[in-house]
Amino acid sequence: MRRYGKHTDADDIRQRPNRKGSRPRTNIRPKHEDAVEGMVLTVDRGRLTCLVDDRQVLAMKARELGRKAAVVGDRVSLVGDLSGEKDTLARIVRIGERSSVLRRTADDDDPYERVVVANADQLAIVTALADPEPRPRLIDRCLVAAYDGGLEPFLVLTKSDLAPPTTLLELYGALDIPYVVVNRDELYDGGAADRVREYLDGRVTAFVGHSGVGKTTLVNALVPESRRRITGHVNAVTGRGRHTTTSALALPLDKAEGWVVDTPGVRSFGLNHVDPSRVIHAFPDLEPGTEECPRACSHDEPDCALDAWVEEGHADPARLFSLRRLLATRERREGD
């Protein structure tokens, strides 16, 4: 066996070639000054469909973005093949700053938050008045997520031919949330779409709701060409509908300006990511009263200054009750 001493001849030593070439590593990233702006319409297994001008372009995330992920509604910058033709692929090299985010966790013990929609202006919470029965706890959780993420909520109450909306509306009356009440016939004949569209014109609206409440049927009426699959069954035992939407999808409104984002039906809405201190921002009549609260006040304890604020007549007691009910949703399950 050949041995080398301390003073070897360099020409005698064999070196393996570098498979990756001799190009030195660098932290300098390309600026992509020629990148084109677009909007993410949907995400499917790592491939993102983006709207660039008036055409849809399939893209993937550039490696330099690291773990940062783009979601439906994101404004992104793309390079590469932007023709939108079959078998072409562009790259997303930048993700724009978000004006709002709708986030959720799988449950209240899950530390990993998931951004469902970015840059939406409002959140349409669709719930049936019967078949399946309304779930106020789930509605409360959606409201907290909307307030926390910077979205304006409004309620769409369906199947009013099966049950009156009075009780549910009384529960949320103090929050001054806009609402639309429709029956099943209106979901199919276009009447519901016409009434809901008035709230959507010129805005980006995310739709959320329990499976089987008619959310996708309503979206189909708002955007006929979407051809979203409609649920045909609500389980008589569990009262749950079959999921018909498996991924979030942004769709342009029909007969109006704006976008609707159809999201998969939810059976739970975890709030582990929510900072309770941010929910108070959705109550401008109560927020000034928190200035005298003790540090880290939960706004539901004996020393909370909001009680005195309300007693002095600065706000309606029902508003304080609603705030505390919403804050408490983070501490209990939807079915409790």
Image (cartoon, helix red, strand yellow):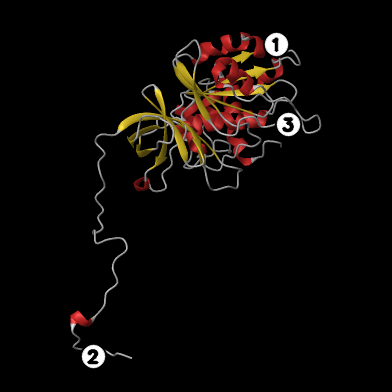
Mark linked to residue 137: none
Of circles 1 and 2, which is in front? Answer: 2
- Residue at screen point 19% across, 80% down: 11
Mark linked to residue 5: 2
- Residue at screen point 44% across, 30% down: 73
Q: Could one spot residue 178 in this view of the protein?
A: no
Determine the image quadrant of residue 328. Answer: top right
> Badge 1: few (under 14), some or many (20 or more) residues near its Cα, within 10 Å?
few
Q: Mark 1: which amino acid? A: Asp
Q: Position of residue 30 (x, y in %)?
A: 25, 44
Q: Is residue 215 left or right of residue 13?
A: right
- Residue at screen point 24% across, 62% down: 22
Mark linked to residue 185: 1
**Marks 2 and 3, the one that precedes in the sequence:** 2
Q: Position of residue 155 (x, y in %)?
A: 59, 20
Q: Is residue 95 above or below residue 123?
A: below
Q: Mark 2: which amino acid? A: Gly
Are the residues flagged by discs 1 and 2 in contact, CB closer than 8 Å?
no
Q: Position of residue 41 (x, y in %)?
A: 46, 29
Which residue carries the number 3 mark? 240
Most foreground residue, 324 or 336:
336
- Residue at screen point 53% across, 12% down: 197
- The quadrant of the rendering that contains the N terminus is bottom left
Q: Mark 3: which amino acid? A: Arg
Q: Secondary structure at mark 1?
A: helix
Of circles 2 and 3, which is in front? Answer: 2
Q: Could one spot residue 304 in this view of the protein?
A: yes
